[in-house]
Image (cartoon, rainbow, N blue to C red):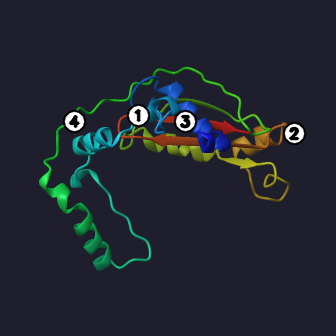
């Protein structure tokens, strides 16, 4: 929890998803709370692994390793999982709820994000959202000086208009069934 609170960008992203998708799918924190750590026993972790881990749901990535070596280690590590049948699980759909969340952080700056529901990955509207994100663009106070070439809408209309804004950028995050489009500023 301390690491998350020290990283204001990660905390804003976590709170944004929690507010946008309150108590469902994308709004559930990927971080365990201090209160829940007492429930993490070897038995509960093994039970979770048996319910959710299957070769069909895993990705293995290697850096600076040959394919043959990576394959050898994958076969050794996951040989037991091939005997476990993949269990069918309910695929919950993200339900956008909207809302707001605030908290005190360790940063001396105000970090704020505003977002609305966006197009899901693969939706025909995704291209338009990506173009809008590019048009709005972003920047920070140190790179938006004259002659820097930063001419995005957020740079010219927000950063150059207010000496109190350190950085501002548009974002578009798409998932399989929903997404978030918004602006994040410091």
Residue at image mark 4? 89
Compute the Cα span from label 2 to label 4: 51 Å
* Quadrant in which residue 38 is drawn: top left
Measuring 47% from the left and 34% from the top, which residue is drawn there?
A: 29
Marked residue nearer the N-terminal end (3 or 1): 3
Badge 3: residue crowd in 10 Å (few <14, some 14–19, many ≥20): some
In the image: residue 185, left or right of residue 60: right
Residue at image mark 3? 14
Compute the Cα span from label 3 to label 1: 16 Å
Measuring 85% from the left and 55% from the top, which residue is drawn there?
A: 146
Badge 4: residue crowd in 10 Å (few <14, some 14–19, many ≥20): few
Nearest the eye: 42 or 29:
42
Compute the Cα span from label 2 to label 1: 35 Å
The quadrant of the rendering that contains the C terminus is: top right
Badge 1: residue crowd in 10 Å (few <14, some 14–19, many ≥20): some
Nearest the eye: 25 or 132:
25
Compute the Cα span from label 2 to label 3: 27 Å
* Quadrant in which residue 52 is drawn: top left
Q: Cβ–Cβ below 8 Å for labels 2 and 3?
A: no
């Amino acid at each position: 929890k301390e690491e998350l609170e020290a990283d204001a960008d990660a905390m804003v992203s976590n709170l944004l998803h929690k507010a946008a998708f309150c108590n469902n799918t994308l709004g559930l924190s990927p971080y365990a709370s201090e209160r829940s750590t007492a429930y993490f026993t070897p038995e509960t972790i093994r039970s979770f692994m048996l319910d959710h881990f299957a070769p069909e749901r895993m990705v293995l990535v290697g850096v600076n390793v040959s394919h043959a070596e990576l394959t050898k280690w994958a076969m050794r590590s996951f040989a037991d999982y091939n005997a476990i049948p993949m269990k069918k699980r309910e695929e919950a759909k993200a339900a956008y709820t909207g809302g707001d969340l605030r908290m005190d952080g360790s940063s001396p700056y105000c970090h704020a994000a505003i977002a609305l529901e966006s197009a899901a990955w693969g939706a025909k509207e995704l291209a338009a959202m990506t173009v809008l994100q590019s048009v709005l663009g972003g920047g920070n106070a140190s790179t938006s000086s004259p002659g820097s070439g930063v001419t995005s809408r957020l740079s010219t209309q927000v950063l150059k208009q207010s000496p109190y804004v350190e950085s501002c950028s548009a974002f578009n995050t798409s998932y399989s069934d929903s997404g978030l489009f918004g602006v994040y500023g410091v």
